[in-house]
Amino acid sequence: MDPLLSGSDYNQLRAFLAVGETLSFSRAAERLGVSPSALSQLVRGFEERVGVRLLNRTTRSVALTDAGENLFRRVQPAVSELGDAIGQVRQYRERPAGIVRVHSFRAAAERYIEPMLADFARDFPDVVLDITLDDTVVDLVAGGFDAAIRIGEVIDRDMVAVRLGPDLRQIAVASPGYLDLHGRPAHPRDLVDHRCIRWRWPGHVMPYAWEFFGNGSWFEVAVDGPLIFNDKEMVLRATLRGIGIGFCVEDSVAGHIAAGALVPLLEEWSAAFPGRFLCYPRQRQMAPALRAFLDAVRAVDSRTDDKTDARPEQEDRHRP
């Protein structure tokens, strides 16, 4: 920025513009809330800074010089626009407005974001929710996101994390038809002899190794099978079709288990892990639009029947 517009020089520019608009030192001084003598000093200092006389003064009148007229005509609209822009930003303190950029795992969005969208759009018409749905673990700050919903084990430690719902667990499931043909595994290591529907974290090369808990610690099983997806919904659909054994978050398959379409397997080795969290970067001043979104999501969570103890704001916890 030009050094003439830094520090106290901006006050000198405002003083010049006020005189240029009113062509009166007394009226300009009243508008700015300063004395006429102080205003005169500001304008004189500005003229010394630019090195050009900008105003012609007599005891009865004030007029812009050619240089002053040219400067006033070019600068006044820009300063007015700047004032309007600052005024609009200040309105953000008073009412929720603007864009809230959210990143969410798909299943979490279906559970916690989709139910609040209609009411949120009605109650906050000046807020735009820009929602990205995928299972990629992104850097929220670098990606320009204001908030995210993800599982506890992939939350950065410098984020504020608010629990949504209970702990989760993943379980192996298969259709009755698959089990009739291939039998039922008795131990997680038996999965290496089965056709498994694998899933890969978006952005990763290798498929996710299935995790189980036994003898006080977690262990992994590198399964094999005919299909690899980067979408968990496709894993579930292929499992329902009897193509192989799937490994799914329990609450996403509970309805299919109750209906008899899927059979849970190896449940004694399926332990709970930190569930879903609403997270956002630490900040001293939170935009009202972001606060409105966070409150709306937490309101959905408070209506969830299977909700466990949820502390208002807590540090993220990771799977042991």
Image (cartoon, grey):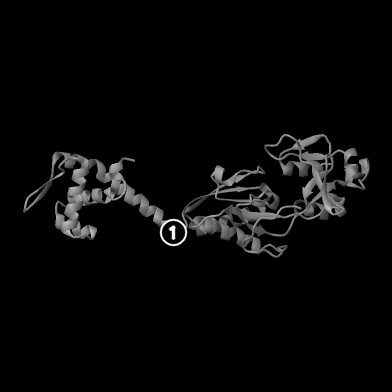
* Residue that appears at 24% across and 50% down: 12
* Disc 1 crowd, CA 10 A, few/some/many (<14, 14-19, 20+): some
Camera sees residue 232: yes
Quadrant where the N terminus sits is top left
Residue 28 as seen in the image, left or right of residue 133: left
Q: Secondary structure at mark 1?
A: loop
Residue placed furthest toward the left:
59
Residue 38 quadrant: bottom left
Q: Position of residue 160 (x, y in %)?
A: 60, 56
Q: Position of residue 30 (x, y in %)?
A: 19, 60
Q: How many marks?
A: 1
Residue 268 as seen in the image, left or right of residue 286: right
Q: Position of residue 165 (x, y in %)?
A: 69, 59
The image shows residue 299, relative to residue 46, as above or below, that is below
* Residue that appears at 33% across and 51% down: 84
Residue 208 as seen in the image, left or right of residue 23: right
Q: Position of residue 195 (x, y in %)?
A: 86, 38
Amino acid type, callout 1: Arg
* Residue that appears at 18% across and 53% down: 41
Front one among 279 and 234: 279
Q: Which residue is mark 1?
A: 93
Camera sees residue 261: no
* Residue that appears at 67% across and 44% down: 135
Front one among 35 and 95: 35
